[in-house]
Image (tube, rainbow, N blue to C red):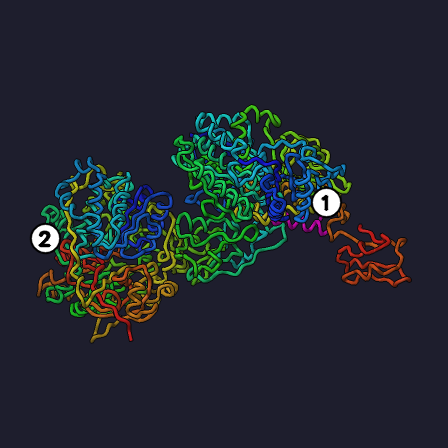
Amino acid sequence: MDLYRSHVLVCGGTGCVSSESMKIIESFETELAKHNIEKEIKVVKTGCFGLCEAGPIVIVYPEGAFYSMIKVSDVPLIVEEHLLKGRIVTDLLYKDHTTDETMNSIDDVGFYKKQQRVALRNCGVINPEIIEEYIAYDGYQALAKVLTEMTPDEVVDIIKRSGLRGRGGGGFPTGLKWEFTQKAPGDIKYVACNADEGDPGAFMDRSVLEGDPHAIVEAMTIAGYAVGACKGFVYVRAEYPIAVKRLQIAIDQAKENGLLGDDIFGTGYGFDMEIRLGAGAFVCGEETALIASIEGKRGMPKVRPPFPAIKGIFDKPTLLNNVETFANITQIILKGADWFAGIGTEKSKGTKVFALAGKINNTGLLEIPMGTTLRETIYEVGGGIPNGKAFKAVQTGGPSGGCIPAEYLDTPIDYDNLISLGSMMGSGGMIVLDEDNCMVDVARFFLDFTEEESCGKCTPCREGTKRMHELLDKIVEGKGTMDDVAKLETLAKTIKGASLCGLGQTAPNPVLSTLKYFRHEYEAHVNDKKCPAGVCQALLQYLVIDDLCKKCGICAAKCPVNCISGVKGKEIYHIDQERCIKCGACLVACPFKAIKKG
Amino acid sequence: MTNSIADIQQADTIFVTGSNTTESHPVIGAQLKRSVRNGSKLIVADPREIPLAAEADVFLKIKPGTSIALHNAMMNVILEEKLQDETYIRENTDNFDELAESLKKYTPEYSAEICGVDADKIREAARLYAGVDKAAILYCMGITQHVNGTETVMSLSNLALITGNIGKPGSGVNPLRGQNNVQGACDMGALPNVFTGYQPVGNPGALEKFEKAWGVTLSDKAGLTVTETFKAIEEDRVKMLYIFGENPMISDPDTHHAEHALQKTFLVVQDLFLTETAELADVVLPAASFAEKDGTFVNTERRVQRVRKAVKPPGEAKPDWVVFMDLMNRLGYEKKYNDAEEIFEEIRKVTPQYAGITYDRIKGRGIQWPCPTTDHPGTPVLHIGKPARGAGLLKPVEFVESGELGDEEYPLVMTTGRILYQYHTRTMTGKTEGINNMAPEVYVEVNPELAAAKGIEDGAMVKITSRRGFVTMKAKVTDRVEKGVLFVPFHWESGANVLTNGEVLDQYCKIPGLKVTGVNLEKMA
Amino acid sequence: MITLKINGFDVEVKEGATIYHAASSIGVKIPTLCYDERLKPHGSCRICVVEVEGARSLMASCSTPAANGMVVHTESEAVVTARKELLDLILANHPLDCLTCEKAGRCTLQDLCYQYDIEESTFDGKRKSYEKDASNEFYTADQTKCILCGKCVYVCSQVQNTDAICFVDRGFETHIGTPFDMGLSESTCVSCGNCVAVCPVGALMPKRKEKFRYWEVEKVKTTCSYCGVGCQMELLVKDGKVVEVEPVKGHSNDGLLCVKGRFSYDFVNHPSRLKKPLVRKNGVLEEVTWDEAYETIVDKIKEIKAADGPDAIAAFSSARGLTEENYLMTKMMRAVIGTNNVDHCARL
């Protein structure tokens, strides 16, 4: 490899690509050529850096200068100042939200300080489309070790001892899954990777596939060796075109290099991989539905048992893990089970990637050791709540997770703690809610998703989510009764207890957890016909504060439905509540803050 | 069937030939597909791309009448690749060497030429059939309705015997019987040469047994088959014909010839309706339908099952057995039966295979004969351990091209068959509006290339001519059939059987060669 | 063998048996809308949920294998509450037109609502509404009445293996349809009606020619009179007429029928049935008494026998007649007339 004096890392993750990071790369190349330094400086298209809030991100090494929100027009300046003259362009550096301090280096950024990147280790570090870069970062060493030094039993054993649990949501011990599949009778077995990331806002699987696809290829090959499979399927949603493309490149490169295909490393072991595209149904993340979809059938869950380890794809024993789970495998092989088990809590080992979103300063992807508290995650890594608002709850586990209130902020994050709080790990969605969020509305929002995404197979989920949604509609419209709230709760419990698959069993979580921790908000909607957070439009009233009204008439002029009456300069203005559409235009328009929302 | 229908689920490979199972035996077709979807391999051989072909691992679209060449080639491959069951051949068959010798010339390439299929596909089929533990053969009229029908069945039986695919669940040579009680009719000796239970009329012991049982003297001379009867009428050897529940005007070959015979003889017809045949009768007797009487039917797997009276016959219609009893009584034979069960009790006494079956035993579920005693559970699989005759005879069978072919005037082959929505001569199905909407009229399937060459468009009227006559019908242009082949469902009057040959019969069982008729096709002006 | 306790009774079942099987084996009936022993367990309706002591949630008995030491309650308070809630949900999306619904009297939903005292739904939200598909000649599909138990789809794909129908759309919009919702007449449907036979409600109904209620009919089990498979069926009879045919699980048919056996029974009641004997007089067939018809035949037989011998008489027996009738026909020909000239259409 050529030696370069500087490396310019430009994020090539989906988020930054949508903010034109590909053009930024082109611009760097043009500018470098213009100054004849293209042989001295290497521009690298990497995977996601995680701090998407600040994207597009450009990092310049060796300094580690962390440029954020870069536009194509910023590139000439960085080239001229930083790369040519060695002066960091401070104005373009990332600023910490809380301290407003300019961060010179990525090492100083709070977002990264508490993180420990195992699954995401290569994301934002290497060019995912170049196998040599992956290899330079110890890539395919784990596979070599497994194939040349270890028996399949030893591989299963090390995964078991590591304590790794499934990162897709269920948290089932990965080593046990491997063992079941290994021991299942059958000549033909499959390894499948669940990359059907369906939780809205969660994108850790996409980031791994985009930023470090070889890690999945390598891990699946290792898994294949361990369980006795010679074929792997990656089920990835078609909405992830970059991930699909880079994974395909990785598969092709691995094949060209003899790391995939027949006789890998000349050991006689053969493994092949194929990508299957999903159409984006949420339920296809459920393992039996995913298998049905891979088989070309309608993605609908099946009853278990038989479990996929016994009867999976085409009724053959199948090992199915998700992307993040696989992303941990090579590190466990290389660094040992004890190393991995040394991270995390007693029952939840290792790290977990979360997609942090909502009312939070550092929106993005982060990887923290299990056992980090919610508070540390939200305030230290996430940089806290913007605009000085008060924290209300954090919703974890995707659309079928639960809402955890402030009093549990010091809970260490692990599988079991989240479940005991009425939520779950899920695939790692984490949405922060502040005082402006109405919890009834939040529950309704998630129900809207799960109702839509119910596969329609079993009665409670198909019919029940619809009725829960309707009851919530009734409540947010101010038409609910306490009977409705009781009915909602009973229904939620029935759906949780009687549904066929994980989607239905967890769909009521947002309702049940908000009922548990924020029942008073439901009561306010029902009894007082008020939305405490001022979100539910039907319950809002815009009122003119008589004392403050200067009779200017601006509000009436701005009202799109002409429901504000009064006489300019003579008479205080009045809003007709019957006709008001609660658009809030008057509130914004009033120069004297004489209109209140209540 | 040597085996049971439920057995199909156990077969590793199923070889379906000359049977459009999903249309002619839809419920077996469904079970067959289920077995295939659960992992059984399927070989289909048929001149048409029948619906089952889509499920097949190997589909052999053979020319009509070439099955023997196919079976012989499959056996050639089996012996060549040593896939035969040596132990079974040694212990349970006779004449293997002669068979092996006769098969030598039937290389896949040789037969591929005759059958019009790919030689490698024959190899593949042979391996699929012989390379597994249990392979079942299902066949139907596509095998039997040939002038060499019996020999075609023999070649199938050879195939099963040399691979030991007989006498165990999931195997066997299984003819699918086309009609509800064709098995029962055969079992009862409604055949010119045997009494009930296939006891030959020419066997002195059997004759004596029946003479004693019935208290009369009996003829030991084999009688006439259906097709021979028409000839005998033409030759004035038969003067009276009594037809019970049949419609030869449509079902029998060479309609014009049959019609002439039916008109000539004194004809009694006993049926539900005034059928095309009844219209020619001198006496017509109104019969009760299956819903109007008690009794039994025997299905294709030899299972004797109950038929129960649900409604009263219309008008003065009577169950057929009452008519036969009345006539026998009037002819001086004084035996009276109060119900069908009394007749069945008499059947049991003279039919060893039925001896153990009683109405009481089959009130819930039927029993498969042979059932020699009342504590015998019935026999789901025949020839277990050893073939019934002691050792299976491997009789060499040579392929001979049908005499219907090779005539320049009639260069195309017409083959006949059934369709899902109609049954036999439509006497029953033709009374249901929905059925007639689904399958309103006769048609001929014509290959697109042939249709183009003759200027025939889909739905156009065409004229088909054979040595026996001509018919006109609509053309259905489809690549289900090959270029030289036409297919006509036989259910309708003035249809396929106007053209078929009733003269040349199988030398053993006198079956006519309905599946191969030399014809010509023209577009109607 | 596996031993478990159901409603306080000890039960022993084979390994692999479900709780539902185990309960059935001791006569405990667990209600269900979607179970069919021929199908791979699919657990759609969830009505068969039972309480298993120590389990996190209620278990669907149709698809949960019985395990050693399990303690199961099939009608506990939790179970009954869940079942009522599920029936409430189903009813919230099902028309209450039982007065005119043809399925009344044998509707499983009706029976279960009666059993669990569900008079009407407590939910009053959106209800589905679809146009009835009457394009098939023999049956109608009314998705408005469908409760999505899935049996029709699975019977079509796993038992009949025709794959004509499938689930369409998802969530609340899920319904049973044909590919691209083109309607049954445009599908690969073979009109076997095996889906109709398993529909627990009035969504799939045979097209009726007679008005009748299921409680008015007498059912007579018999064997189909078409091909040689020997399918077992029940004739539904009202006022001396066959008004419907239903499949019965027999050895050879596994509960299936085809379009002919299931829907083509009109010939039985058909007005053109022969009702009196006919004898040709002056070239025309005329109605006569049985006596006259018999005499004509007997005279002819005697005449020919005397003149040309018994072998001048021949008969075709029938592959559609009873075994007993074939026997008597051959006996008549052989023992009474004296010839072996008897054959039938086995070859045709």
Residue B467 percent coordinates (x, y): 18, 68
* Subunit ID for the residue under disc 1: A
Dots 2 and 1: beta carbons under 8 Å?
Answer: no
Q: Secondary structure at mark 2?
A: loop
Give the residue drawn at x 9%, y 47%. B204
Q: Nearer the viewer, residue B112 or B430?
A: B112
Quadrant, the N terminus of chain C: top left
Q: Name the spot of residue C6 as percent of width and height, x first.
A: 50, 33
Callout 2 amino acid = Asp
Magenta residues span A465-484
Mark 2 vs mark 1: in front: 1
Q: Is residue B333 left or right of residue A312?
A: left
Answer with the quarter of the image where residue B39 lies. top left
Q: Position of residue A398 (x, y in %)?
A: 62, 41
Magenta stretch: helix, strand or loop mostly: helix
Query: Residue B232 placed where, x, y %?
Result: 12, 64
Give the numbered dot on residue C146. none
Q: State the residue position of label 2.
A: B220
Identify the residue at the far right of this view.
A570
Residue shown at 34%/61% (left/top)? C268
Which residue is label 1 attached to?
A: A437
How many circles with numbers are drawn on the protein?
2
In this rendering, does residue A408 appear at all?
A: no
| Separation of marks 2 and 1 at Cα, in angstroms | 101 Å
Q: Is residue A477 magenta?
A: yes
